[in-house]
Amino acid sequence: LTGASQRAVKLLLQGETEQAAAACRAVLEGTPNQPTATHLLGLARARLGAPAEAEPLLRRSLSLEPANHEFRLNFGNFLRDQARLSEAEAEFRAVLAQVPDARKARHQLALTLEELGRRAEAEAEARRTVSSEPRDMESWSLLGFVLTKQGRLLEAEQSYQRALDLAPNYGVAHHNLG
């Protein structure tokens, strides 16, 4: 990343979204096809409540750098936030086709499948994360969430407890246990 792109990432992570967008625009003035600045500007526009402006930027960044699985994961998250779940599912599956062990993509896919009412598939994805990363508290918590949605409360409680065994202060699991 260029210095200006690194600055934009830092600003975006700090919640300085307007400043991040300005930094991205400055990069794009000099280098209009810079994929990272294009992508970050899309993320900034989405955070600023302008999804109609964000989407073409996110799509363009993917056309500039189609193998960038982080861009694709972020685009899937954008689509999921827009309640475009089938499209989001396709993006998460594309990430997993590129990087089969992409935990974040598998988590988002499981949550998307749950939202689509495809609970057996959601559970299968959650179980894949647990089996590939048995020491990951977020994976156990995800499985607990999916099982809760299915009404399988005892199994869900066991999953949340496993998450807490791995990370006793993990707030999400504490919250979900009630």
Image (spheres, rainbow, N blue to C red):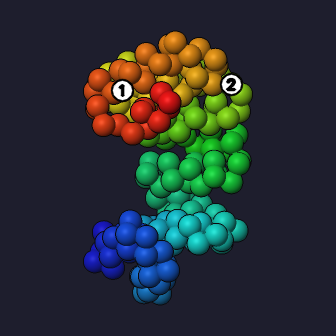
Residue 101 in the image: x percent, y percent?
Answer: 38, 32
Q: Is residue 61 left or right of residue 130?
A: right
Picture residue at 58% right of the left edge, 35% below the top: 111
Examine the rendering and report whether any part of residue 28 can be seen.
no
Q: Where is residue 136 in the image (x, y as percent from the top left)?
A: 33, 30
Residue pointed to by mark 2: 118
Q: Give me the residue at 71% from left, 33% from top.
A: 116
Amino acid type at image mark 2: Arg
The three-letter code of the residue at mark 1 reads Ala
Residue that badge 1 annotates:
163
Of mark 1 and mark 2, the one earlier in the sequence is: 2
Q: Is mark 1 on a helix, strand or loop?
A: helix
Does dot 2 land on a helix, a strand or a loop?
loop
Residue at image point 57% right, 48% down: 76
Q: Position of residue 132 (x, y in %)?
A: 35, 22
Q: What separation in Å lies between label 1 and label 2 (alpha carbons)?
A: 24 Å
Viewport quadrant of the N terminus? bottom left
Looking at this view, is 172 or 8 the one in front? 172
Residue appearing at x 50%, y 30% in the figure = 178
